[in-house]
């Protein structure tokens, strides 16, 4: 399919000064207890309309879809790559949501060695306000990839009135700046680091995604494994002034964070096809055939690379007396607080087209820009 460039926005906005802050460690998901404080969705994918059944905790462990690798002490979250799936059935996968939610004044670091990729695959690490009806309460997409795209994307979803204005960020491939957008498509940008997704991410042994959720704005850094500074490795506190310029930044100047965002629950998902990976104009940009017929129900080895390998997720707070916020409900397929960012089939299409166009724009050197 010929790349579609309509709607790509390449920005050179004047940045505003960032305010550095120090955050202290309050929560760690790691090692043998990694899965203890997450809820498993345990339902078919009724949010992103993917061709998967999200398993329970017990099913995930018994089927080796969600477990801690005894050799590395790291958490594995994967798509079933062993079973044959018959027509009209769905493949097993995993969606987990943190039991605790984290308010403004929090920062979290996901240390990811491998992320799912491949045709039909749609992985994400993100957060949302489980206590609100989406998009109220906001959503932060830290990492989201699709199919065989060379890079990932990040961004926000909110109700109307939040706009990305004058960011101080590395990415110059801004898909959309209106954080509501058409059909809640959000204000998304491309993570232009050359190893932000796919085989390149895996070959580099991934890296860390750092999300600052502050009243002054929301920022996301991606640091490849070889470049992770000692100030981040094993840290009990994080000073954001040591992190450099974030990949993405959404300052308070265009978005009053305290009005558009509520405490966030963290989420890992990997689904197949669905509203993002499945549409022909997206799927056939990097893959051949038909998403469900040629992948989901065909050779299970298609999903040998469809897994997260997670060293840890650490949460920090700028409040010296901060503690985690206990969950008020569990995240299941029918819970009223569950994220609904993809309940509408059209909800992602605006950002998908822009994502596709900016990615291919980068590859082709549009306006002289190249991936670094």
Image: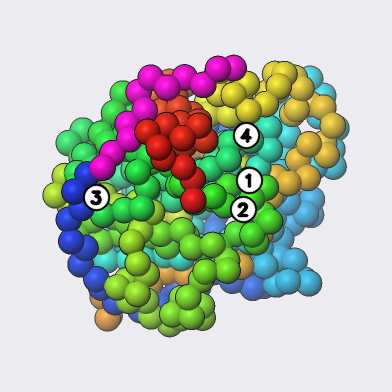
Residue in the picture at 60% in, 59% down: 206
Dot 2 or dot 3: first in sequence order is: 3
Mark 2, residue position: 201
Mark 4, residue position: 147
**241 falls in the magenta region:** no
Are there few (<14), some (14-19), or many (20+) residues within 10 Å of tag 1? many
Dot 2 or dot 4: first in sequence order is: 4
Q: Give residue 198's mark.
A: 1
Whether pointer 4 and pointer 3 mark residues with C-beta atoms closer than 8 Å, the reply is: no
Mark 1 vs mark 4, CA separation in Å: 9 Å
Return the x and y of residue 165 as percentages of the image width and height.
19, 44
Q: In this picture, which residue range is highlighted in magenta?
A: 1-12
Return the x and y of residue 253 as percentages of the image width and height.
14, 49
Mark 2 vs mark 3, CA separation in Å: 25 Å
Q: Secondary structure at mark 4?
A: loop
Q: Nearer the viewer, residue 41 or 178?
A: 178
Which quadrant is the N terminus positioned in?
A: top right
Dot 3 or dot 1: first in sequence order is: 3
């Amino acid at each position: 399919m010929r790349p579609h460039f309509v709607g790509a926005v390449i920005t050179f906005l004047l940045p505003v000064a960032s305010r550095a802050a120090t955050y202290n460690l309050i929560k760690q998901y790691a090692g043998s207890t990694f899965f203890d404080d997450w809820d498993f969705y345990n339902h078919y994918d009724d949010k992103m309309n993917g061709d998967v059944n999200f398993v329970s905790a017990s099913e995930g462990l018994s089927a080796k879809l969600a477990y801690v690798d005894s050799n590395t002490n790291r958490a594995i979250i994967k798509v079933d790559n062993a079973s044959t799936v018959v027509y009209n059935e769905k493949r097993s996968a995993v969606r987990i949501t943190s039991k605790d939610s984290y308010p403004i004044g929090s920062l979290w670091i996901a240390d990811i060695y491998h992320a799912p990729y491949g045709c039909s695959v749609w992985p994400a690490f993100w957060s949302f306000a489980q206590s609100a009806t989406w998009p109220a309460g906001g959503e932060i997409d830290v990492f989201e990839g699709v199919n065989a795209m060379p890079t990932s994307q990040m961004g926000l979803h909110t109700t109307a009135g939040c706009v990305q204005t004058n960011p101080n960020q590395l990415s110059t491939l801004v898909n959309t700046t209106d954080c509501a957008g058409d059909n809640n498509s959000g204000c998304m940008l491309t993570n232009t680091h050359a190893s932000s997704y796919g085989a390149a991410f895996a070959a580099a042994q991934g890296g860390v995604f750092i999300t600052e959720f502050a009243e002054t704005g929301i920022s996301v850094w991606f640091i490849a494994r070889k470049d992770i500074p000692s100030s981040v490795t094993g840290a009990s506190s994080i000073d954001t002034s040591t992190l450099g310029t974030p990949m993405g930044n959404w300052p308070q100047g265009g978005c009053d964070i305290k009005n558009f965002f509520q405490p966030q629950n963290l989420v890992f998902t990997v689904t197949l096809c669905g509203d993002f990976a499945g549409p022909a104009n997206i799927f056939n940009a990097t893959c051949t055939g038909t998403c469900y017929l040629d992948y989901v129900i065909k050779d299970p080895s298609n999903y040998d690379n469809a897994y997260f390998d997670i060293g840890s997720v650490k949460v920090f707070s700028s409040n010296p007396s901060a503690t985690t916020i206990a969950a008020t409900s569990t995240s299941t397929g029918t819970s009223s607080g569950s994220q609904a960012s993809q309940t509408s089939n059209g909800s992602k299409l605006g950002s998908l087209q822009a994502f596709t166009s900016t990615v291919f724009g980068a590859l082709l050197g549009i306006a002289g820009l190249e991936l670094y």
